[in-house]
Image (cartoon, rainbow, N blue to C red):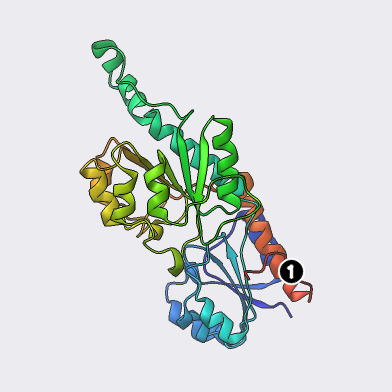
Amino acid sequence: MRPDVLVIFPLRPRAMAQLEASYALHHLWRAEDHDQLLRAVGSSVRAIVTTGERGASAALIDRLPALEIVACFGVGIDAIDRAACARRGVPITNTPDVLTEDVADMGLVLMLAALRNIRGGDRWVREGRWRTEGPMPLTVRAGGKRLGILGLGRIGKALARRAEVMGMSVAYHGRRRQPDVPYPYFASLEELAREVDVLALTCPGGAETRGLVTAAVLDALGPQGWLVNVARGSVCDEPALVRALVERRIAGAALDVFADEPNVPEALLGLDSVILQPHAASGTVETRDAMAQLVVDNLAAHFAGRPLLTPVG
């Protein structure tokens, strides 16, 4: 008999075909009445397939008495109630490593797009201003700038390597100093922001990092400083960020993530100093396929009694 799996949101087509062949899937994402579906199948569900954004609440987990594993499509698991899983002894898996390079690429692209005003240049051409007004206003170079990284994990290190190739110097802030990295460490995020030209956020989301980028940090970054966020919207005090941008207390920002996705603060939409992306840093065909396959492989390992490939510690 095939194990029952609750799909909170579907994966990539090839991965879904593999799941369909091995499990009895119950698609919560397309059920008109979630409560009715859970009443019908909740007692038999042994696994959840979810995403980092949709997660799995304690209320949902409590309705699945046979639950054995939560497999997350994404690195961030802040929307999964880890305490509820821990109480039940339910392991969580995620999909690290396979998205590192693409997210770091997006961090670099966003930084360059902001510093070189790629959005403004594109508009300068499209609106005919190159013909009528001549060259667009000058931008600033990346080479020689100081990059501060909040969260020097896999993605942070990959971004640092790219920045060094661009001729940037790198420093970082995190929970602790890492003895095996060559970059200067700042014990205070505010101190780091004061010393850099660009502050890039690559840390995990969740309670531990919520609101770390405060108004004081933004003021320390200053009117010549730029913010790049490929982490989670929750890491920033978003109202403080909007005020800093509107009041030009920082030079600009490049944002892939927001506090209440897909809702973006209205004030950001009209600002030329901001580059906006729809939480798409890992959004390549290759990476999303690899992430989906890792979800499939973690479930296969669990139900075969093998060690999980990427358990969350």
Residue 85 seen in the current view: yes
Tell me if mark 1 has few (under 14), some (14-19) or many (20+) residues whose alpha carbon lies within 10 angstroms of its own: some
Q: Quadrant of the N terminus?
A: bottom right
Question: Vertical placement of 96 versus 137: above or below?
Answer: below
Residue drawn at 40 percent across, 38 percent down: 197
Residue 276 in view (yes/no):
no
Foreground pick, 60 / 10: 60
Helix, strand, or loop for circle 1?
A: helix
Q: Residue at x 40, y 28 (%)?
A: 116
Query: Residue 109 placed where, x, y %?
Result: 49, 36
Residue depicted at 49% across the width and 48% down the height = 149
- Going by the numbered disc 1, the residue's amino acid type is Ala
Q: Is residue 296 left or right of residue 185?
A: right
**Residue sitting nearer the eye, 161 or 189:** 189
In the rendered structure, the answer to whether residue 287 lies left or right of residue 169 reads: right
Whole-percent x and y of residue 34?
Answer: 45, 77
Q: Quadrant of residue 130?
A: top left
**Can you tell which quarter of the image residue 118 is in?**
top left
Closer to the camera in the image, 2 or 279? 279
Q: Is residue 94 above or below residue 26?
A: above
Taking the image as shown, residue 176 lies to the left or right of residue 110, namely: right
- Pinpoint residue 268: horizontal percent, then vertical percent: 27, 45
Looking at the rendered image, the quarter that the C terminus falls into is bottom right
Q: Which residue is mark 1?
A: 300
Q: Quadrant of residue 14?
A: bottom right
Q: Position of residue 161 (x, y in %)?
A: 60, 39
